[in-house]
Amino acid sequence: METARLNEIVESYPTPTGKILGILEQVQREDGYLQKDVLKTLAEKLEVPLSELYSIATFYSFFTLEKLGRHVVTVCMGTACHVRGAPALADTLKALLKVEEDETTQDGKFQLTTADNDFTVTSARCFGACSMAPVLRVDNKIFGYMTPERIPAVLKQFGWEEDTHQNA
Ligand code: FES
């Protein structure tokens, strides 16, 4: 994000220090994520510690510090979904979208983006739709009772075509 645009956003809030959440939301809406450089500049402008902005950005799940693909596919790895096959859904997504697995963290969380930036595959804990487990969310749309076999049809709704995605 250009500094001039960041200034406009900050100035649109009359009392900036009380509006940090709103400013961060606006920045993420325009950039797609919260870039480290932008957070640093913002911390200086708002005269708040950078650590405070990071705390907010990491506390709220709707903020992300990583650039996301145009479509975000989230696999629920909550208990109900996990026991009903969520790991197989995750494996199928990674294979179909050809994303590397080396970013998976020790606690099983992962966030992988295709090289063409079309899709990000990530994990979350419980969408509150356990009765439909296992559950997948693509952008804001929930798909329940998922099976690995149904995934290609779901991805196609979002522009995926077989063999178009390369390794990240
Ligand atoms: S555990 Fe997956 S929706 Fe609740």
Image (cartoon, rainbow, N blue to C red):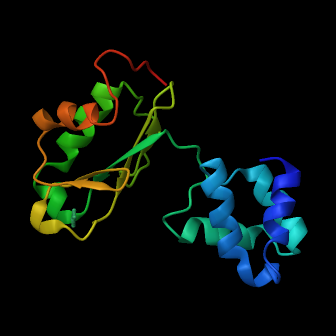
In this rendering, would 57 be left or right of 84?
A: right
**How many numbered circles does the render carry?**
0
Q: Is residue 57 above or below residue 30?
A: below
Q: Position of residue 122 (x, y in %)?
A: 39, 47
Ligand 1 image position (quadrant) = bottom left
Q: Is residue 30 above or below residue 52?
A: above
The quarter holding residue 135 reads bottom left
In this rendering, would 11 be left or right of 1?
A: right
The quarter holding residue 132 reads bottom left
Q: Position of residue 137 (x, y in %)?
A: 29, 52
Q: Position of residue 25 (x, y in %)?
A: 62, 65
- The residue drawn where x is 16% and y is 67% is 130
Q: Residue furthest top?
A: 163
- The residue drawn where x is 59% and y is 49% is 32
Q: Position of residue 110 (x, y in %)?
A: 41, 46
- The residue drawn where x is 11% and y is 33% is 149
- The residue drawn where x is 87% and y is 52% is 3
Q: Is residue 140 above or below residue 162?
A: below
Q: Nearer the viewer, residue 78 or 33?
A: 33
